[in-house]
Amino acid sequence: MNKKSKVVKISHEAIGNAWGISKQAVAKWVKMGCPTSSIEAATKWRDEYLQASGKAAPATLNEARLEKTLLESERIRVRLQQDRGELVEIAVVREAGIRIGAIFSAKLAALVNDASGALAGLDEASLRKKLHERTQAILAEIRNELEKV
């Protein structure tokens, strides 16, 4: 009768401690093929797996905690800016841009359509004055719409 040699296995907890991750996370790696014969073998397998998949090796637990803290801090900063009204949703900006563009197009089209009749017979100084007044009125309306955003 042949005695099978015992293969020593390292616990998920031991690998997790070495990598700075939970034993549940190690269990997921093991299901993907990570060996448990030694921490070195597991680490080698993980590095090769990550390199083949184009992913970076996981950070140490402290680095991961720092990154998480920084991301949470950024999320809080963005929420605070939203609460202060410093940030506007993209949809609101897009809608305002479309509305302002439509106003601008309509006013310019009206200016072009009635320009010949409204400006006929005016000397150059009067013509410039009328055009200036009309363009200022268009710009004022656009400014009013921008203030609504």
Image: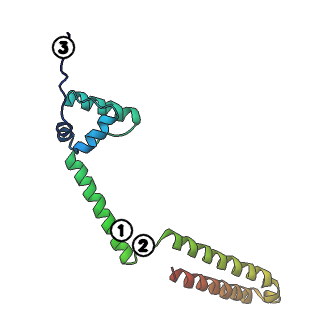
10 Å neighbourhood of mark 1: few (<14), some, or many (≥20)?
Answer: some
Which residue occupies the foreground of this view, 94 or 126? Answer: 94
Give the amino acid at mark 1: Val
Above or below residue 18? Residue 126 is below
Of the numbered discs 3 and 2, the one sitting upstream in the chain is 3
* C-beta proximity under 8 Å, tags 3 and 2: no
Q: Are marks 2 and 1 in contact (CB under 8 Å)?
A: yes
Does residue 92 lie above or below 147 as drawn?
A: above
1 left or right of 95 in image: left
Nearest the camera: 113 or 133?
A: 113
Residue found 30% across the figure and 33% down from its top: 46
Q: Which residue is mark 2?
A: 87
Query: Crowding at label 3, few (<14), some or many (≥20) Cα neighbours within 10 Å?
Result: few
What residue is drawn where x is 36% and y is 73%?
Answer: 81
> Marks 3 and 2, how far apart in space?
71 Å
Residue 147: image location, x then y, percent: 51, 83
Residue 103: x %, y % from top left: 65, 80
Q: Which numbered dot is residue 78?
A: 1
Name the residue carrying label 3. 3
Dot placed on the residue nearer the N-terminal end, 2 or 1: 1
Which quarter of the figure has residue 102? bottom right
Task: Write down the quadrant of residue 60 in the picture.
Answer: top left
